[in-house]
Image (cartoon, rainbow, N blue to C red):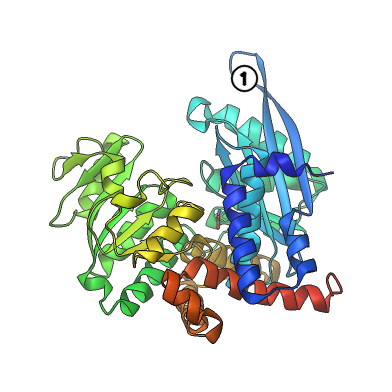
Amino acid sequence: MIIEDELTSAPLYRDVMRSLESSARIMNANKNVIERLRLPRRAIRVSIPVRMDDDRIQIFSGFRVQHNHTLGPFKGGIRYHPQVNMGEVAGLAALMTFKNSLLGLPLGGAKGGVQVDPAALSKSEIESLTRRFTSELSPFIGSDKDIPAPDVGTNEETMAWMLDTYALETGYSQMGIVTGKPIEIGGSQGRLSSTGLGLVHTMEKALEVKDTSIDRATIAIQGFGKVGLHACIEAHALGARVVAVSDISGAIYNPRGLNITDLIRYKDENRFIKDYPNAEPITNGELLELDVDVLAPCALDGVINEKNMHSIQAKIIAEGANGPTTFESSRYLNQKGVLVVPDILANGGGVVVSYFEWVQDVGWLFWTEKEVRTRLRNIMHGTFDKVWRLSEDPLFTDINKKNGKDLRLISMVSSLHRLEKAMKLRGQAW
Ligand code: GLU
């Protein structure tokens, strides 16, 4: 039995449920469908004993939540972070269901995580942890069952260990068991940059509807990891002026635009962006409040909230992270005229290319980087256009007047339309 209180104690889960309920009300969704989507189908909790380098045993808590698989196998990342808990993972798993549905992928939604600070562990400790976690999950995952991928705190290497452990458990190599793995063992061209690139594609569209374009835009990016770094590179390549970025060491600002190539070189040499000479230091909080065309929070959830929402000056917020803007602050900012491009749309590029990777794996195919990038661009632009068209539906006339075009709710309605149809066809709701 899944204990709802445990889930609702996580702010992210509560926010996801609030946007589910609000969009369900707007579209007058089938009650049975919503009832089924409120709780995950399965929530797995495991203990992961790890022999640490000093020979101590340390036990970590691991989670995998399989939210819904009406549209296809469960799909979603694995997060290593000290704040991971069942409620957060369940909220993130539900977001994957809605994201995959919105993007038109034949995939359901899941998410996993381990409560751990990966920076505090040695590489061999992380490998042991990953292998043991994968063994515990192995009865529940598989390339046509549930397909993990990287998320915060995990990467290609983590996926390679998962693939290898799963092969040891089952006795044969199944390349489609995880996505986001190294190219040499079945990964896809273009997967590393995919979330950042997809994010920039949604920025292009959002700027277009605001009657401007990416080559005239100023952008601030919170986070310089897997998502933020590639968003910087891709936006810069399209002529945008990236004026601020941040990592855990702090934030930097240069109103004339940062030289991204030089900044990457500096980070490679110094590990962090702190003290980068060609910019002024600012705080992470100040970065969020800059007067820019696009603000892209690409780190953790809840960074734009009731405390700082009144100080946000950006014209567009493109959610590179999952849940960076709370439900309340998102609504407030929309009413103020800020266009918030929600996570399930803005950061969908990662799972889109995961899907391409999986298609290549199960079909023993290899696509070129150009092919991957063209297909990604078509899906991202196409999905934005679909949401924008839906925003002009009479269903939203009054709400648009009252709240401004609320792309979070509109994207959710689009996603729910597909899920509702599929659940009825499968006899899961009536
Ligand atoms: N972790 C990414 C996300 O939140 C990618 C998930 C995947 O590729 O399965 O969308």
Quadrant where ligand 1 appears: bottom right
Query: Circle 1: is it few (<14), some (14-19), or many (20+) Cα within 10 Å?
Result: some
Q: Is residue 280 visible?
A: yes
Image position, residue 290 (x, y; %)? 24, 52
* Residue 398 vertical position relative to residue 2 in the rendered view, above or below: below
Residue at left offset 68%, top offset 67%: 107
Query: Tag 1's secondary structure?
Result: loop
* Residue 332 vertical position relative to residue 57 in the rendered view, above or below: below
Residue at left offset 48%, top offset 30%: 119
Residue toward you, 66 or 209: 209
* Residue 21 vertical position relative to residue 87 in the rendered view, above or below: below
Q: Is residue 385 left or right of residue 108?
A: left
Residue at left offset 46%, top offset 80%: 388
Q: Quadrant of residue 164?
A: top right
Name which residue type carries label 1: Met
Residue toward you, 106 or 425: 425
Residue at left offset 70%, top offset 63%: 108
- Where does label 1 land, which residue? 52
Q: Is residue 83 left or right of residue 403?
A: right
Residue toward you, 292 or 167: 292
Image position, residue 77 (x, y; %)? 60, 51
Image position, residue 393 (x, y; %)? 53, 85
Q: Is residue 380 visible?
A: no
Look at the image and tell me in which quarter the N terminus lies.
top right
